[in-house]
Image: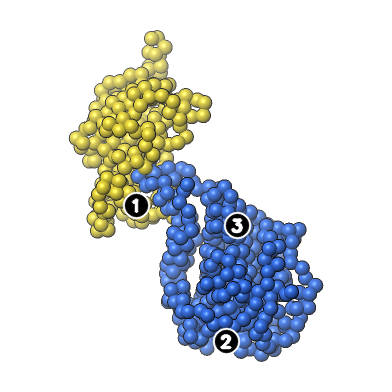
Chain colours: A blue, B yellow
């Protein structure tokens, strides 16, 4: 029995064939695989998911980013025109490309980390967007891409490509959400080339409902003087794994990775990141914050490479985590591999309970213990979000975070 | 207002307060002075409800209620205020949001309606002027990136906002230059009334030039060993704490 069955397979025969033959000789990574040490796939690998165009979704407007200038909505990986909004000369659907066009677009993005997530994606993807922003173009407003997971034991397998032309500027929201979904799977693979002098900003919101597992592989390739920024906000889901691979192949670049996750109930959230500095004179900063309560688990693995010729790199990495219960766990692993000698790299990781001194300070002013804890948890979670420069996106994400915390934070026993 | 009877407290196995007796009435200002390690900060922590300390004996009545039985938040809601020696930085919680939450929880406890946004902002404006605190600081995270002087002024600003019955100033003068000291003291003096009381805990006499106490108590080795009027502070300043230690040894 195959892990994923695509009942609506169309086109891209060569890409699929190659991926399926790779999968035939591939096993699910086990605990001995360093990259999957804390994320067990045993249970989910025994399930089976179907790719099917079921069109069940009602309008889920309240889940959308209302200020988006253009919105493309996909349900279980199939485009839903009725829920979408507007169009853009720069955006095409992947399913409208010929195999030749897709292959050459992928070649331009230049960098893919091989593995089980991209292979399943190549074999079973249905759609997604291909965004090609011409040189010198600033895209007005925020492009929103919505992926809805729906139904039972369904897989949503989507592929997205962005080519950000020289000196272009764009902001995108990736909004992963679900409706009445049970035991579903989301597989998302994303490729981006950020050309010289371009700026690309991504906001990725994972707000699946319980029972939906999510696997992402994001591969970014940066050229000279480009700026790439991503904010990954994980609010819900079953097993969530984000592989973020950034290859900085140009000088004078800046890379920013911000992340927040709130893992409650039995959630498992795993953020694996790689920033690979190949050229000199770049800066990168990476800050991930995590909250784990109930029986949830959080994993952070952040790898930074500084290659031999990449002098004058200034790379910063920090992972800060709060545990809210005795049964919650956090595993963090910073990894620095530095081959150049004139670089500045720093990293730090902390995991602890809420700050007792701060808690007492709040209570000493008359704020009840539960409210004081909630204030501190909100503050911890919102700290990264408040740094988002786009007012509309920031406020929208803050609202989502508030809703999540209010819904899932258990009162103290 | 506050009656402390034979209060003993320890942290881990070390007894720090060894039988404190103190009565504070409405309208009074008491100063508690003493050398380092005498138990001054322990006393303020125990009164505010810090859980690191274990009270082994004694009683504390606050307006007739058993203070030691109350959670820290209930002590504040009953009108006790501690100005911290080391105010805590709380990233991500704005001063405004924090104070509004505190005021409303205190009001709810005392069966009053929540303060309106308009009244609250007017109060912030009025009270921040009292301690010459830049109103912009009220928008920032609690104490985050504040200078030492700003932190202490923020404590008095909070005190002004919460209008406590009893305020305990724990070494509020430490780390303050003379101008900040004057501003802080001025704020405290303006808040003084016949209905509230203040306990000033300090190592030095300096602050007492600005906040004139009705009573001065010397705390040494976990006990109040000498009490007197404001002139006792001057005598201490002149003769030093060794004077007290020698007197005790002679006795």
Residue A329 position in % (x across, y down):
60, 52
Q: Which residue is mark 3?
A: A298
Q: Is residue A210 left or right of residue B114?
A: right
The residue mark sitting in front, 3 or 2, is 3
**Dot 2 surroundings within 10 Å: few (below 14), some, or many (20 or more)?**
some
In the rendered image, the residue lying farthest to the right is A25
Using the image as rendered, state which of residue A322 and residue A108 is in the foreground: A322
Q: Give the structural element (helix, strand or loop) at label 2.
A: strand
Location of residue B72 (image quadrant): top left
Q: Which residue is mark 2?
A: A92
Residue B18 position in % (x across, y down):
42, 21
Labels 3 and 1 share a subunit: no
Q: CA distance from mark 3 to mark 2?
A: 36 Å
Sequence order check, earlier mark of 3 and 2: 2
In the rendered view of the protein, which quadrant contains the N terminus of chain A?
bottom right
Q: Give the structural element (helix, strand or loop) at label 3.
A: strand
Labels 3 and 2 share a subunit: yes
Q: Which residue is mark 1?
A: B101
Location of residue A195 (image quadrant): bottom right
Contact flag, marks 3 and 1 (Cβ < 8 Å)? no
Location of residue A291 (image quadrant): bottom right
Asked whether residue B91 is in view, the answer is: no
Residue drawn at x 65%, y 59% is: A301
């Amino acid at each position: 029995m195959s892990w994923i069955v695509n009942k609506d397979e169309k086109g891209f025969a060569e890409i699929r064939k190659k991926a399926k033959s790779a999968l035939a000789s591939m096993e699910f990574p086990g605990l001995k695989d360093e990259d999957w040490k804390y994320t067990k796939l045993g249970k989910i690998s025994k399930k089976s998911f179907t790719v099917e165009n079921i069109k069940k979704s009602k309008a889920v407007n309240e889940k959308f980013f209302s200020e988006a200038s253009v919105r493309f909505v996909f349900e279980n990986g199939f485009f839903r025109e009725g829920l979408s909004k507007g169009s853009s000369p720069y955006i095409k659907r992947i399913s409208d490309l010929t195999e030749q066009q897709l292959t050459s677009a992928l070649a331009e993005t230049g960098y893919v980390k091989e593995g089980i997530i991209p292979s399943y994606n190549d074999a079973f993807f249905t759609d997604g967007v291909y965004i090609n922003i011409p040189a010198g173009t600033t895209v007005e407003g925020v492009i929103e891409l919505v992926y809805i997971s729906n139904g039972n034991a369904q897989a949503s397998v989507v592929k997205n490509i962005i080519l950000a032309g020289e000196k272009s500027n764009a902001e995108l929201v990736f909004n992963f959400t679900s409706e009445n979904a049970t035991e579903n799977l989301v597989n998302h693979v994303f490729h981006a080339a950020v050309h010289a002098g371009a700026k690309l900003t991504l906001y990725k919101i994972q707000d699946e409902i319980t029972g939906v597992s999510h696997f992402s592989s994001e591969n970014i390739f940066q050229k000279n003087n480009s700026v790439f920024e991503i904010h990954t906000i994980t609010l819900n889901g079953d097993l969530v794994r984000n592989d973020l691979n950034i290859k900085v192949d140009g000088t004078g670049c800046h890379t920013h990775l911000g992340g927040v996750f709130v893992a409650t109930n039995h959630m498992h959230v795993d953020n694996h990141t790689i920033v690979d500095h190949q050229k000199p004179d770049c800066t990168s900063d990476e800050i991930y914050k995590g909250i784990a309560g109930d029986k949830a688990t959080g994993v952070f693995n952040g790898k930074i490479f500084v290659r031999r010729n990449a002098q004058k790199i200034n790379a910063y990495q920090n992972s800060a985590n709060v545990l809210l219960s005795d049964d919650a766990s956090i595993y963090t692993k910073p990894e620095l591999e530095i081959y150049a000698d004139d670089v500045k790299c720093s990293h730090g990781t902390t995991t602890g309970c809420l700050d007792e001194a701060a808690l007492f300070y709040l209570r000493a002013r008359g704020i009840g213990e539960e409210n004081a804890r909630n204030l501190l948890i909100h503050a911890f979670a919102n700290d990264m979000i408040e740094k988002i420069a786009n007012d509309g996106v920031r406020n929208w994400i803050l609202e989502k975070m508030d809703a999540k915390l209010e819904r899932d934070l258990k009162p103290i026993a | 207002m506050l009656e402390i009877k034979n209060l003993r407290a320890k942290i881990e196995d070390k007894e720090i307060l060894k039988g404190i007796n103190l009565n504070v009435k409405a309208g009074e200002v008491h100063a508690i002075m003493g050398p380092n390690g005498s138990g001054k900060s322990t006393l303020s922590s125990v009164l505010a409800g810090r859980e690191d300390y274990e009270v082994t004996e004694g009683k504390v009545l606050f307006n007739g209620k058993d203070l030691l039985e109350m959670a820290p938040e209930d002590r504040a809601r009953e009108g006790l205020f501690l100005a911290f020696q080391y105010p805590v930085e709380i990233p991500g919680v704005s001063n405004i949001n924090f104070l509004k939450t505190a005021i409303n929880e205190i009001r709810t406890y005392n069966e009053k309606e929540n303060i309106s946004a308009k009244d609250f902002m007017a109060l912030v404006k009025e009270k921040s002027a009292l301690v010459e605190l830049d109103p912009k600081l009220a928008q920032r995270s609690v104490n985050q990136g504040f200078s030492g002087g700003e932190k202490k002024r923020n404590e008095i600003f909070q005190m002004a906002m919460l209008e406590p019955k009893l305020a305990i100033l724990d070494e509020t003068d430490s780390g303050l230059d003379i101008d900040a000291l004057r501003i802080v003291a001025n704020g405290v003096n303006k808040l003084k009334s016949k209905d509230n009381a203040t306990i000033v805990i300090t190592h030095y006499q300096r602050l007492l030039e600005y906040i004139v106490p009705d009573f001065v108590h010397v705390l040494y080795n976990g006990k109040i060993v000498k009490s007197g009027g404001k002139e006792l502070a001057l005598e201490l300043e002149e003769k030093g704490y060794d004077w007290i230690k020698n007197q005790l040894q002679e006795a």
